Amino acid sequence: MPSTMNEPMIRARDIHKRFGEVEVLRGVSLQMDKGEVIAVIGPSGSGKSTFLRCLNHLETIDRGRIEIEGEAMVTSGSDGLARYVADAELRRICRRMGMVFQHFNLFPHMTVLQNVIEAPMVVKGQRREEIVPRAEALLRKVGLLDKCDAYPSRLSGGQKQRVAIARALAMEPDIMLFDEPTSALDPELTGEVLRTIRQLAEERMTMLVVTHEMGFAREVASSVVFMDGGLIVEARPSAEFFAAPEHPRTRAFLHNML
Amino acid sequence: MDYVISIIGPLAEGSLVTLKLFFITLALALPLGLALALVRISRFRSLALAVGGYLWLMRGTPLMLQLLFIYFALPFVPVVGVRLPDFPAAVVAFALNYAAYFAEIFRAGIQSIDRGQYEGAKVLGMSYGQTMRRIVLPQMVKRILPPMSNETITLVKDTSLIYVLALNDLLRAARGIVQRDFTITPFIVAAAFYLLMTLVLTWGFQRLEKRYAVYDE
């Protein structure tokens, strides 16, 4: 049954995922409340992106349980195998999560505005007249209203990513997932994207951000999750995490990063 | 010059047969080819394999043979055996054959679209059908324009094969006049007709490419 007030937004239990011989996730559990901003950090290959992609069904898990505000999208029975809910149900639950990718994945054949209004029109059946003003407001918010009629190929990486954020927000998600949103950007362009994400944090958007930006994790995230080898090694409020990391592996990682 | 003008009438009539076959084939083979491509890349293994076999058959035997088979041999095949008049027989053969070639062009175009496009559409809640219709196929069109241009130009010229069914297309009309008047002029005029048709096609595809050039990928 849909949510009571105190259900966490995301509850993931014992997620396992393997690609062939490699076990990428070896039992990851995470719970996050409404309005929380969690940064997921860790060396490459630690499984952090895969974990994020499992949450909105871009990857299917082998074992475990994922609930979005109390609604299960996948469960595991006594045989341990993951069983997903029916397709329509799954799509409805996943639609509560917006996602921003490392490589933007904007639709190149559509203008900036079309990119933003496409899904609300096609998926939600909203009329153009009602969605365009909202899309314009979102583009103004990310500072790109003047690029409305431009095609994505004319934009810088930072601008593309901000359009991608506006596009995800247009579906009015309850949770935003960011998969290394600044990793494909030139260093001088990361600031504008991080500012936009920070702005969302101030508006109490629930966000899970896989990132290599330690400064961002420290300043914006309420908690930090450190993953390594397909497991969560350490998960704590970000102030504590950076002040006094507990695990030796966390310390080694932070030492290399900072 | 007067002679040229005097044979333009019958050659133009032949061109009409050629153009009729060309357009009907396109109208049938494009949707059929797209359907074949979508099945070929679908997760329905056995259907995809069956389409693979179909493509092998249609691309692996001469169009001329298929034409002759559908006209002369099909009536004797049990169950599906029907006797088709000459022009419909030609249409069926051309549509089935060209659909196979189009299917491979469509497939190549669809598979060239980055996986990120599917993921971008999926996280916005689009179904597979919506993703195809709104995101993948429109981008595919831009990429397949050059090979499509090739294939349709080939189709214009392949229509001349229907002379084996004694259909009076452009080339057969020209040959008739050559044999009657003992001059090769009709061949030259026929060549000019073909060149004109392919010129219009080439120009049309150029315009399409320009229209799609408004965006880069």
Image (cartoon, coloured by chain):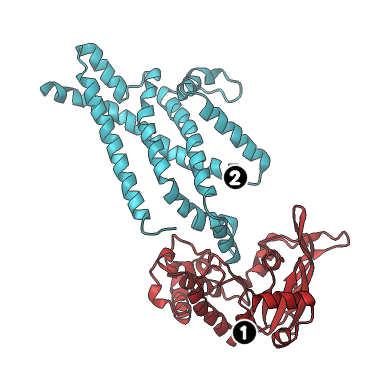
Chain colours: A red, B cyan
Circle 2 chain: B
Residue B123 lies, with reference to residue B98, above or below; the image says below
Which residue is situated farthest in the left direction here? B2
Q: Is residue B202 above or below residue A20?
A: above
Image quadrant where residue A47 sits: bottom right
Q: Residue at x 51, y 79 (%)?
A: A191
Image coordinates of residue A187 in percent, x first then y, are 51, 74
Q: Position of residue A217 (x, y in %)?
A: 64, 81
Q: Residue B22, image x and y in percent?
A: 37, 34
Quadrant in the picture for the N terminus of chain A: bottom right
Q: Is residue A122 visible?
A: yes
- How dense is the environment of label 1, judged by Cα within 10 Å: few (below 14), some, or many (20 and up)? many
Q: Foreground: B174 or A248? A: A248
Q: Which residue is mark 1?
A: A220
Residue A10 seen in render? no
CA neighbours of label 2 inside 10 A, class few (<14), some (14 to 19), many (20+): some
Name the secondary structure under disc 1.
helix
Q: Amino acid at mark 2?
A: Ile
Question: Taking A62 as reference, is A178 above or below it?
Answer: below
Which residue is the extreme one toward the right?
A78
Circle 2 is placed at which residue position? B41
In the image, which is nearer the foreground, mark 2 or mark 1? 1
Give how far across and how far down residue A70 sits, in percent. 75, 76
Q: Nearer the viewer, residue B129 or B52?
A: B52
The image's mark for residue A91 is none
Question: Could you say whether the residue bearing mark 2 is in a helix, strand or loop?
Answer: loop
| Residue A227, quarter of picture | bottom right
Residue at x 61% of width, y 21% of height: B78
